[in-house]
């Protein structure tokens, strides 16, 4: 089946253009005879969830692991919502690497298992801890299994009675992480780092490719990231939400971070730091984009975080003639109301219409 689109290309367009997707799922600029016209007056290259866990669900505020069939159901639901590219930033035992994806599922870049020591991450997600002396070895093993990323938990509270307890602390030395990053890069992989402390500055110096959460980021770190090319995935839906049982210290930390965001996010954008949209295990991508806008980004920049910036940073084609393409259409302009992202009119993933 071939498809035709007459719509304004977002996030930067202002006039409608004509596009076609041929029967092979490739974007073309010449009319395709018999192509079916897709509904919608605005088109994006597909939404990108750059920090997601399709194999994990949050229950009562704590993560639980999903089966393979449940993870596939999650991915199918995300596809119908307009999410066309997913970066899985860790799965229990690397289970996502074993999923049998079918046409119409989002494109998937996986990080394999969580790299964290025993007792320094959620037990439900860490079937086996990774000791520091094996960090590089086991990171490379995830690449050998098919991962394109590795996910290191660079800081985390000690776990007591199955739950994080107390303030986060370093899980690995800076030297061990730097050695792992160098080895992963030599093997053509990339490193995403979970970090919520000021250890973020050392991680950026070590060469990590993306900072996940990054709640201790400041101007000096952002300037270092601009030089290194590291991306920032703020995961605001996750880090700004607190359970009712949260301590007063935790509430103060979140309140302070919320106050800094209106300065940090626009600065990152001005410096050219790739800002990525990611849901973690909380809410929807549409809500995450809205949170980015509520905390300092212009709506068009927030939309970029969930579309073109995500595609470019992850190295996935989206607007090249003759290449497999993804796209999502909307009746109204999301830049005027980001809630529009929750109501796609049509979704095409590599030639397959899933909505």
Image (cartoon, rainbow, N blue to C red):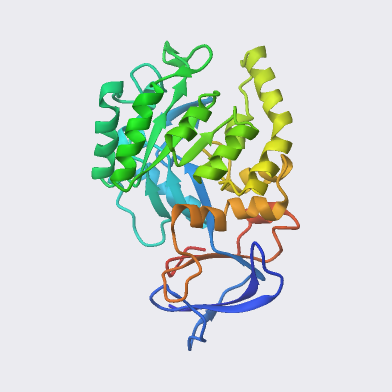
Q: Residue at x 48, y 51 (%)?
A: 77
User: Looking at the image, how many numbered discs can be counted on the residues?
Assistant: 0
Q: Is residue 82 left or right of residue 206?
A: right
User: Which of the pair 35/255 is nearer the observer?
Assistant: 255
Residue 37, image x, y percentages: 56, 79
Residue 175 drawn above or below residue 30: above
Residue 26 drawn above or below residue 49: below
Let me know if residue 291 appears in the view: no
Q: Is residue 67 left or right of residue 257?
A: left
Let me know if residue 286 appears in the view: yes
Residue 53, image x, y percentages: 44, 39
Q: Residue at x 40, y 78 (%)?
A: 23
Residue 63, image x, y percentages: 46, 28
Q: Residue at x 67, y 13 (%)?
A: 248
Q: Is residue 86 left or right of residue 131?
A: right
Residue 191 drawn above or below residue 78: above
Residue 57, image x, y percentages: 46, 34
Question: Which quarter of the image is occupied by the N terminus?
Answer: bottom left
Q: Is residue 109 left or right of residue 302?
A: left
User: Which of the pair 311/16 is nearer the observer?
Assistant: 311
Q: Residue furthest bottom?
A: 33
């Amino acid at each position: 089946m071939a498809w035709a689109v007459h719509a304004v290309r977002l996030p930067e367009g202002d006039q409608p253009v004509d596009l076609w997707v041929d029967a092979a799922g490739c974007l073309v600029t010449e009319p395709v005879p018999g192509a079916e016209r897709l509904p919608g007056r605005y088109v994006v290259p597909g939404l990108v969830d750059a920090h997601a866990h399709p194999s994990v669900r949050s229950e009562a505020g704590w993560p639980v692991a999903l089966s393979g069939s449940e993870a596939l159901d999650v991915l199918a639901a995300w596809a119908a919502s307009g999410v066309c590219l997913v970066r899985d930033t860790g799965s229990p035992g690397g289970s996502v690497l074993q999923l049998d994806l079918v046409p119409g599922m989002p494109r998937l870049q996986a990080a394999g298992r969580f790299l964290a020591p025993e007792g320094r991450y959620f037990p439900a997600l860490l079937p086996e801890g990774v000791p520091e002396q094996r960090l590089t070895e086991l990171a490379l093993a995830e690449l050998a299994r098919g991962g394109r990323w590795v996910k290191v938990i660079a800081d985390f509270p000690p776990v007591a009675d199955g739950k994080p307890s107390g303030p986060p602390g370093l899980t690995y030395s800076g030297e061990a992480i730097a050695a792992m990053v160098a080895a992963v890069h030599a093997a053509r992989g990339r490193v995403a780092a979970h970090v919520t402390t000021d250890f973020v500055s050392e991680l950026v110096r070590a060469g990590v490719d993306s900072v996940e959460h990054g709640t201790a980021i400041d101007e000096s770190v952002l300037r270092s990231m601009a030089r290194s090319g590291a991306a920032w995935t703020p995961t605001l839906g996750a880090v700004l939400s607190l359970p009712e049982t949260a301590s007063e210290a935790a509430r103060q930390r979140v309140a302070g971070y919320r106050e800094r965001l209106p300065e940090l996010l626009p600065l990152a954008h001005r410096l050219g730091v790739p800002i990525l949209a990611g849901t973690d295990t909380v809410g929807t991508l549409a809500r995450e984009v809205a949170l980015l806008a509520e905390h300092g980004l212009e709506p068009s920049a927030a939309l970029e975080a969930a579309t073109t910036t995500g595609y470019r940073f992850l190295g996935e084609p989206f607007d090249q003639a003759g290449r497999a393409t993804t796209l999502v259409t909307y009746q109204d302009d999301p830049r005027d109301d980001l809630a529009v992202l929750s109501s796609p009119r049509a979704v095409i993933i590599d030639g397959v219409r899933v909505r």
